[in-house]
Image (cartoon, grey):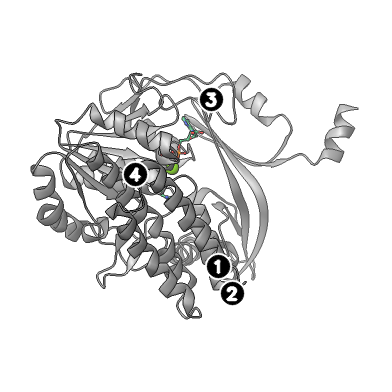
Amino acid sequence: MKVFKFGGASVRDTERIKNTASILQRFRDESLLIVVSAIGKTTNALEEVTQAYFKQTGDAMQRMEAVKQEHYRLMAELFGTENHPVFAEVNDIFVEADWVLEVEPEDSYDYIYDQIVSLGELVSSKILAAYLREQKLPTQWLDARDVILTDDIYREGWVQWEETQNRADRIAKPMTEQGGFTVTQGFIGSTSENNTTTLGREGSDYTAAIFSYCLNAESMSIWKDVPGVLTADPRLFENVTKLDELSYREAIEMTYYGAKVIHPKTIKPLQNKSIPLYVKSFIEPDGSGTKISSETEDNYPPMVAIEGNQALLNIATRDFSFVAEQHISDIFNQITAHRLHVNLMQNSAISFRICVTDSDDKVKDFAKAIEDTFKVRIEPDLELITVRHYNKMTLDELRADKVILTENRMRNTVQMVAKKVPPIRRKAVDG
Ligand code: ADP
Ligand code: ASP
Ligand code: MG
């Protein structure tokens, strides 16, 4: 069997859903497990619903209604009638949100987030499965929460592999062994108490890798709006080229440093079982895409990844004691407890510097947790530029218009934490 993953862009409207179904027609005789993301930008919209509800701004219901209407409109276009049974199924899922939104919030933000935001994948998978059945493709629907067990850290559940493997053997394997298509949700899992969790934003690629691993898939394919893995994000750079092949090692490095095309956690489970990963275009399904496996030569052109939303934290001991092993261990315990993503680190005698992804209040909460021993200076609104297989020309081009706050240079990788030059200074330089 093979695992396919279709992201939000591939199901964002009627035309795209039809396109996805036509790609799947080509594989009608195969056994496929199909992982699907929420439709278009639904996850963002549901995040806004959650925020409105949690802060009780008064418009949570209204925002939720807009999400529902968008889905109903899409279904009406796809199925032509509101009498199709999928309307009731989708409605049943949305009703759960109404139950949450009707009462005042009591649980933690992260818990509520997962209960609301997970609805996006639940409804998209229902719609896609129903549409595939409509196209006479033999399709079953699988609740990913019955298979993927996580710990109870909401919004960033960590997979409990042993139990997930058991459940995959018990529940998912018999489904895929019947042949045909099994459609399931990306991004979501559940705790041992059956509460819904999410795996972290953009986590659907990772879900596909979890299923690939547990079901010993022959290959995994992720269908994207790009021809494959490129040397940089085409939305930010011109003159990018496609990489026909990549090693697992290169792919894990690129994605770890922020190449947005694949979720960073995706590669490890695949590498562990030597399952090849294909990155293919749903716009040009006949294109060769990129193959990620162990069978490649490591000879690459410069590749660039840019991560916005970064903060540089300077952590200094208050009593001028050295930042020694015990301190570093204390700092890292708190980093783990706050699920901070550290993208770069450096240390000197009495200070320790990390560049982290600045999401919600995580950074502030972390600084607070260590404030008794450490003074933390936070510089927000930065970007982290990573260049693999760098050369001077690439670095010089990237440095233009930027103030580089710190730089790390390794054999194959340069990382720069950068701030855009404020317009006034740029003018002075130009003039
Ligand atoms: P999905 O719909 O599966 O969630 P994403 O939007 O997460 O897909 O990923 C595809 C996007 O990743 C592309 O549209 C592209 O803008 C971006 N991207 C960033 N870095 C790269 C890269 N090195 N190669 C290809 N695409 C990249
Ligand atoms: N829908 C989720 C998100 O947008 C997961 C995913 O698409 O990968 O983050
Ligand atoms: Mg994505």
Q: Is the Cβ of the residue at disc 1 closer than 8 Å to that at disc 4?
A: no
Q: Which badge, 4 or 2, is on the more N-terminal residue?
A: 2
Q: Secondary structure at mark 1?
A: helix
Q: Which residue is mark 1?
A: 60
Residue type highlighted by circle 3: Tyr
Q: Secondary structure at mark 4?
A: helix
Q: Quadrant of residue 133?
A: top left
Q: Which residue is mark 3?
A: 390
Q: Quadrant of residue 200?
A: bottom left
Q: CA distance from mark 3 to mark 4?
A: 51 Å
Q: CA distance from mark 4 to mark 2?
A: 36 Å
In the picture shown, does residue 85 fall above or below 250? below
Is the CB of mark 2 within 8 Å of ligand 2? no
Residue type highlighted by circle 4: Phe
Residue 122 placed where, x, y %? 34, 56
Badge 2: residue crowd in 10 Å (few <14, some 14–19, many ≥20): few
Which residue does the image show at 15% across and 41% down from the upper left? 216
Q: Which of label 2 and label 1 is nearer to you?
A: 1
Q: Which residue is mark 4?
A: 79
Q: Which badge, 1 or 3, is on the more N-terminal residue?
A: 1
Residue type highlighted by circle 2: Gln
Tell me the quadrant of the picture where the C terminus can be found. top right
Q: Which of label 4 and label 2 is nearer to you?
A: 4
Q: CA distance from mark 1 to mark 3?
A: 47 Å
Q: Is the Cβ of the residue at disc 2 closer than 8 Å to that at disc 1?
A: yes
Q: Is residue 310 left or right of residue 299?
A: right
Q: Which badge, 1 or 4, is on the more N-terminal residue?
A: 1
Residue type highlighted by circle 1: Ala
Q: Which residue is mark 2?
A: 56
